[in-house]
Amino acid sequence: MIAQNVAEIIRHHVTLEVEGIDRMYLNAYVPGLQTEGGFVHFVRNHMGYPIASTAVVAPLSDGFVRAIEHFAKKQGVDLVTFAKDQRKDDLTWEYLARCTFTEGVLFIGKAQEKARVFRTIHKKNAETGKSYPWISRGSALPNHYYFYLVDEDFGPLFIKFCSYFPYAAKVCLNGHEWVKRQLAKEGIAFEALHNGVLSCENSARLQALCDSLDAEKIDALFRKWLAKLPHPFRPQDRAAGYRYDLSILQAEFSLTQVLDFPRTGRQFFEQIIRENLDLGRPDRVQLIFGRRITRRTPGTFRTRVLTEGVTPSVNVQYKHSKIKQYHKEGRD
């Protein structure tokens, strides 16, 4: 067999190539409540209290927790306290295996996790010696509530709320699940991977769907579930402009290339490793991340070739960015 380089293998042996969003982990936050000054304005100008203190928002937090418990009871949804070091994904798959609906709440999980919250501290007036309250940011271990959901368009996802003011939230979704549901709705035949697509009768439409998953659709998904789930902010708070915005905490994008034969997959990876062992070197980082590297540039530069069983993977890392090349589900 004549050895082929990576470009030749891709040109002659790839039967399906599709690029799109894999997983997204999003921050949900209220812009006006990210600083101590914003908290003071909320308490004094919006709630009408003369002195800003976290004590006045505690009843709001208690009401939010009660609303979650009432929602779980009314909807017949399990409210589960996660055990320490319990894998949340494992429990979620157990619920998904028993799921019979196309849209709804699978279960609600509760866990203590670190969060940045507002605190009331006391300072002393240098002239009078009297103490006065002061709002500061600090860390705490409040309960977080995970709403594990099944969405008709997006499939499995979760939205997590901190139970302490200002109720920071996270949204985790999967772009592959969204695309598979759109293909099914349009009647396009495809073969699914656990996290991707193996084959599709209309590859051009598959790529067009991947390209169409945008911020507007993701934002609409979040707003839709905010309207269905217990909301930490009261209607009068939202009417005053205290509404969530979304930002990206972590984004994963995938390029899936399906090869024609298992032996081609093995050959592909042999050439990948041979041609790219220097990807993690500083002089090559600019080619991948568009960043000029000097002696003063901090960060870790490395390429790792890992082997799990007989399946290799290549991992390239620069600071918080990573590129990973691997066989999906162990397929060649």
Image (spheres, helix red, strand yellow):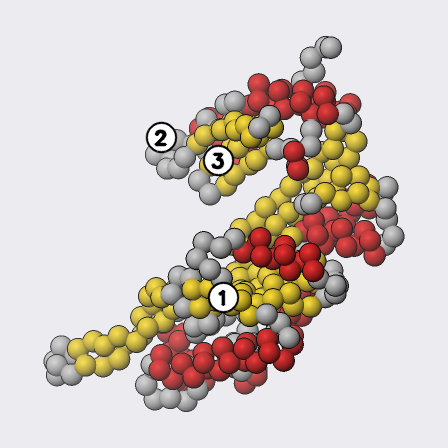
Is residue 287 at least partly visible in the picture? no
Sequence-earlier tag: 2 or 3: 2
Residue occupying the point 53% across, 62% down = 170
Q: Nearer the viewer, residue 314 or 329?
A: 329
Disc 1 to disc 2, C-alpha distance: 49 Å
Residue 42, by quadrant, is bottom left
Residue occupying the point 50% across, 23% down = 278
Residue tagged 1: 81
The kind of residue on which mark 1 rests is Thr
Q: Nearer the viewer, residue 60 or 307?
A: 307
Q: Nearer the viewer, mark 3 or mark 1?
A: 1
Sequence-earlier tag: 3 or 1: 1
Q: How far across and down, in percent of the image, does residue 261 sit?
A: 76, 25
Looking at the rendered structure, the secondary structure element under dot 1 is strand
Q: Quadrant of the N terminus?
A: top right
Disc 2 to disc 3, C-alpha distance: 18 Å
The kind of residue on which mark 2 rests is Arg
Residue 317's disc is: 3
Residue tagged 2: 295
